[in-house]
Image (tube, rainbow, N blue to C red):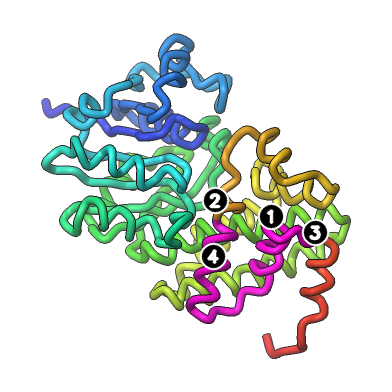
Amino acid sequence: MNIPAPIGILGAGSWGTALAILLARNGRRVLLWSVDKTELAPLAADGENRQYLPGHRFPDTLDIEPQLHRLTAAASDLLVVVPSHGFRATLTQLSGCTPKSLRLAWATKGFEHDTGKLLHEVAQEILGDRVPLAVVSGPTFAAEVAAGVPTAITVASNNAAFAAHLARCLHSNNLRAYTASDITGVEVGGAVKNIIAIGCGISDGLKFGANARAALITRGLAEITRLGMALGARAGTFQGLTGLGDLVLTCTDDQSRNRRLGLRLAAGEERKAIEKDIGQVVEGIYAAAAVHKLAQRLGVDMPITEQIYRILYAGLAPRAAVEALMARELKHE
């Protein structure tokens, strides 16, 4: 009887842990690793991630592996789930001990902060063109996936066989996995929606109501689509789970760290104090800087993103940002 090789998860935050639990429940052996070795010992001792995902016990087939070279010796399918600012460093470390048959996926959402590159561009730069790549994205909160409530996601890859394999591994009675080939579109949707979610949090924090929230989501989707198409994505991708689906989720539920940031910015709190209190990376902050620069370079009109950038990095008052958006010249939708 052939026993499937384990799947390696690089990153033991809430989302990495949730995916590790899901895959282990689905009958796969999973090896969970983190660049921060100090957070692994409590996971092994407690049998759960009490810091980021308390109350969700690890299945017996989920093992903690502190040594990356041992993980890659056992697992050739790897799933990276680290913040976007740590993506290059993680892959650089991985490149020193890659298995011969490496297939790499990631559930990280964002652009590389310094260069504005999409994450698949970073992966190709470090690992070359021969490694099959995939991105896992969609409207997902880690706690709900760990709890086993109904969820749908997308696996996009430049290798159809790898996408299908990952989808089968992730699919369960409570999680439906679709496949796609538009990696660029999936990445853009997953990154830019975090910026729009900050805007929706600000709008709701200012008590602007459901009309304003709906307008921000709709016009935010237009911005996401324009940027994605400028980068070579397909327009239809943004009508799916990784575009509209992820955008609606992140903009409307307070499990979203980006939305919570916006709510508290509207109340007059300082950004850095909010980040410290949230205690996890708020990806929309970094995406706003990268997308602002990228949109300027490509000549893509992104007025909501521009105002969120100015709130985060230029000290613009949230109410003044709304006034600037409402004062824009009338145009055809």
Q: Amino acid at mark 1?
A: Ile
The x, y position of residue 179, in whole percent, is: 35, 57
Q: Residues within 10 Å of mark 1 (few under 14, many from 20)?
A: many
Quarter-of-image position of residue 22? top left
Q: Nearer the viewer, mark 3 or mark 4?
A: 4
In the rendered structure, which segment of residues is drawn in magenta?
Answer: 287-316
Q: CA distance from mark 4 to mark 1?
A: 14 Å
Q: Nearer the viewer, mark 1 or mark 2?
A: 1
Question: Where does label 3 land, which residue?
Answer: 203
Question: Where does label 1 land, which residue?
Answer: 198
The x, y position of residue 331, in whole percent, is: 72, 89
Whether residue 84 is visible here, answered yes or no, is yes
Question: Where does label 2 land, which residue?
Answer: 139
Q: Is residue 102 left or right of residue 296?
A: left
Q: Residues within 10 Å of mark 4 (few under 14, many from 20)?
A: many
The x, y position of residue 142, in whole percent, is: 54, 37
Q: Earlier in the sequence, mark 1 or mark 2?
A: 2
Q: Which mark, by number, is residue 291?
A: 4
Q: Earlier in the sequence, mark 4 or mark 1?
A: 1
Q: Amino acid at mark 3?
A: Ser
Q: Is residue 155 left or right of residue 309?
A: left
Q: Secondary structure at mark 3?
A: helix
Q: CA distance from mark 3 to mark 4?
A: 21 Å
319 vs 188, nearest the viewer: 319
Rendered residue at 88%/56% (across/down): 207
Looking at the rendered image, the quarter that the C terminus falls into is: bottom right
Rendered residue at 60%/79% (across/down): 301
Q: Secondary structure at mark 2?
A: loop
The reply to whether the magenta stretch includes residue 305 is yes
Q: Is residue 215 left or right of residue 70?
A: right
Q: Earlier in the sequence, mark 1 or mark 3?
A: 1
Q: Amino acid at mark 4?
A: Val
